Amino acid sequence: MMTRSSGCLCAFAALVLILCPEPLSVATAQPQQPAIGAAMRPLADVLEVVTPAVVNIAVKSGSSAETNPLYNDPFFRRYFDPPEMRQRLSAGSGVIVDADKGYILTNHHVVADAGEISVTLKDRRRFVAVLVGSDKATDIALIKIKAPQLQALPFGDSDALRVGDTVVAIGNPFGLGQTVTSGIVSALGRSGINIEGYEDFIQTDASINPGNSGGALVTADGKLVGINTAIIAPAGGNVGIGFAVPIAMASTVMQQLIQHGEVRRGRIGVVIQDVTPDLVQALGLTESSGVVVSSVEQGSPAAGAGLQAGDVIMSVDNHRISSSADLRNRIGLAPAGSEIEIDYMRNGTRKSVTMRIEVAGAIDETEAQVDRLEGAEFRDAGGTVVVKHIEEGSAAAQSGLRVGDVIVAVNRRPVSSLSDLTTALHDAARTIALDLIRGGEKVFLIIR
């Protein structure tokens, strides 16, 4: 079971979320030096420079106390007092990435629903922060403080990490205060950790515990390569399996949060699947990397560039594509309107094409907000919203949605466009009730 802790120190589960774009001058990625070597400075010397850039974050938020179920009935509501609001306190971590502007990277789940965000520096100065923007799909948020004499942490190159590289985790576990632990990179490109959204995690055995969320994963030469995000914790504590969002992904999100206050995801209009050994043989490929294009949407950037079903996408902007999740990350996190170069194989011949990424439709916005409909693609259809594709085995498929379903309302709230659907899903409570038209008949679908 996955539990969102948002920094609550009592939040333990089998999988625990822990409290664990204009380019920024201090955030220029530099090639990472080998983590182990005779020329490396003593780790204690590196930490003296690095640790002032890692902050503790305290969040105050309000939640309603439990009420009598009859309060939800408009007829009986007049007989009950309104529910009281209870103040909830949680703690997490953050990393200063721009000293002049006061920008601090942290996790979305640390600051979600925050009423007040307080930042405490290593020198014990305390400031109230403002939220610049937050992205649930990558679990990255950006906050800002106004303070003199800040120290930022320079970015490393998370794409250059190798399994076995030494890394250090810095954060605020259990609200104890700044703590440093060390370990190695255990694995790269982890996905399917059951956290909704875009996944490309760095796995590490550096001890990470509740309270570390939003903290820094740093190389032995003092470069920021990840934002600590989650742990697998059968007993609620560290068992040597922690995860961090690569700084390459976090910095891309950060740039869009600075520019737009949100992430405007891109799309090219293809349905894809991983290359399997059977496909390698069937398509006459020489390697099992890349992803196969299953279909191309008419009028999409991919169609305009000439991509066809059966093409195998090998790389994007010279970055080798290893899986469908990898391509989804590259396209979905690229700014809408930017151009990308795609290398692909067709009938044994390698080809290259450049296309402009367009603004994503409701699939990306919906996946970023409601994981219960993950895997469904929607389209506008003359004042209605139609399910145009459902990924086999996805959350949307398991919920009972079908291709061709016409969505009329969400929790009795009428929807007539992708924008309406996205807004309604964002505002929906834990249970989603969909009014559908399927095969000319009305269908009422409950998704919990």
Image (cartoon, rainbow, N blue to C red):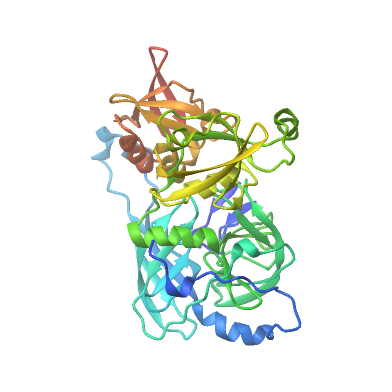
Residue 59 against residue 437 in the figure, above or below: below
Q: How many numbered circles are shown? A: 0
Residue 181 against residue 209 in the figure, above or below: below
Q: Choose between 41 and 57: the one closer to the eye.
A: 41
Residue at (35, 63) in percent of width and height: 132
* Res 323 quadrant in image: top right
Q: Position of residue 265 (x, y in %)?
A: 42, 47
Residue 111 against residue 364 in the figure, above or below: below
Q: Choose between 102 and 270: the one closer to the eye.
A: 270
Q: Choose between 329 and 88: the one closer to the eye.
A: 329
Please state if 315 lies on the left or on the right of 335 as rendered: right
Q: Is residue 249 visible?
A: yes
Q: Position of residue 178 (x, y in %)?
A: 56, 77
Q: Is residue 107 visible?
A: no
* Res 288 quadrant in image: top right
Q: Choose between 86 and 373: the one closer to the eye.
A: 373
Q: Which residue, as the protein is rendered here, is positioned at the far left?
A: 78
Residue at (48, 32) in percent of width and height: 376
Residue at (60, 64) in percent of width and height: 158
Residue at (49, 67) in percent of width and height: 91
Q: Position of residue 45 (x, y in %)?
A: 63, 87
Please state if 428 lies on the left or on the right of 45 as rendered: left
Q: Position of residue 229 (x, y in %)?
A: 56, 60
